[in-house]
Amino acid sequence: MQQKATNITWHDGEVTKTHREGLLKQQGVILWFTGLSGSGKSTITVALEQALYQHGHASYRLDGDNIRHGLNKDLGFSPEDRTENIRRIGEVAKLMMDAGLVVMTSFISPYRADRDLARSLVAPGEFLEIYVKCSLEKCEERDPKGLYKKARAGEIPEFTGISAPYEEPEEPELVLDTATLSVDEAVQTILEYLKQHNYIH
């Protein structure tokens, strides 16, 4: 995105990300959950946030619906608005990660280019793409918000999986198949990955 503001200067502080990570005894990282509506992204991140808290880790969850109530309430679901939605979330997640937090983003984020842009905002190893994999049929069967039914009836235009595309991740750090994994198993899989790669101790 083009820089519109002029006469601005970046001001570094004297407390660095490394300092903050040392204080928190963890590594700041973005866990970018992507998948179809109904795949289990929000359910898993809510449970993961609770598990991290119980283990003494500082984290924050950015949820798609929640963000659209405030920061992104001016955006709809056109391809352009979806791109801007993810761009803003990427920038917010970067700031929170720089604060030393384990940041969880729970967004459909259907386009690979948008997810790649979010990844490019941070250094290698600071962005973990987690594909919450679930078939369209299974997601539609669950339909926790009744959105697929509305989309099939033509009441929701540009609905991912029905009238708008979803581009599966090609090389995610983790794949969670929620057709076979329980929420607890998914959370344990993520925690084990974070421990093995020294994001948390």
Image (cartoon, rainbow, N blue to C red):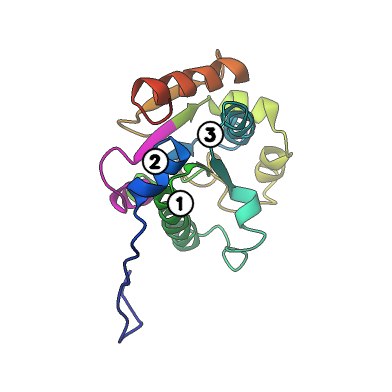
Image x and y of residue 92, in percent = 47, 57
Tell me which segment is drawn in magenta. Answer: 114-130
Q: Which residue is mark 2?
A: 22
Rendered view: 3 above or below 147: below
Image x and y of residue 31, in percent = 44, 38
Decide whether residue 84 is among the magenta residues.
no
Q: Is residue 152 visible?
A: yes
Task: Name the residue at the left extreme.
Answer: 124
**Going by the image, does 8 lie left or right of 48?**
left
**Real-space Cα distance between discs 1 and 3?**
17 Å
Image x and y of residue 40, in percent = 60, 30
From the viewer's perspective, is the residue at label 1 or at label 2 nearer? Answer: 2
Q: Residue at the location (33% across, 46% down)?
A: 18
Q: Residues within 10 Å of mark 2 (few under 14, many from 20)?
A: few
Task: Please tell me whether mark 1 sits on a helix, a strand or a loop.
Answer: helix
**Real-space Cα distance between discs 2 and 3?**
12 Å
Q: Amino acid at mark 2?
A: Gly
From the viewer's perspective, is the residue at label 1 or at label 3 nearer? Answer: 3
Q: Amino acid at mark 3?
A: His
* Comes first in the chain, label 2 or label 3: 2
Q: Which residue is mark 1?
A: 93
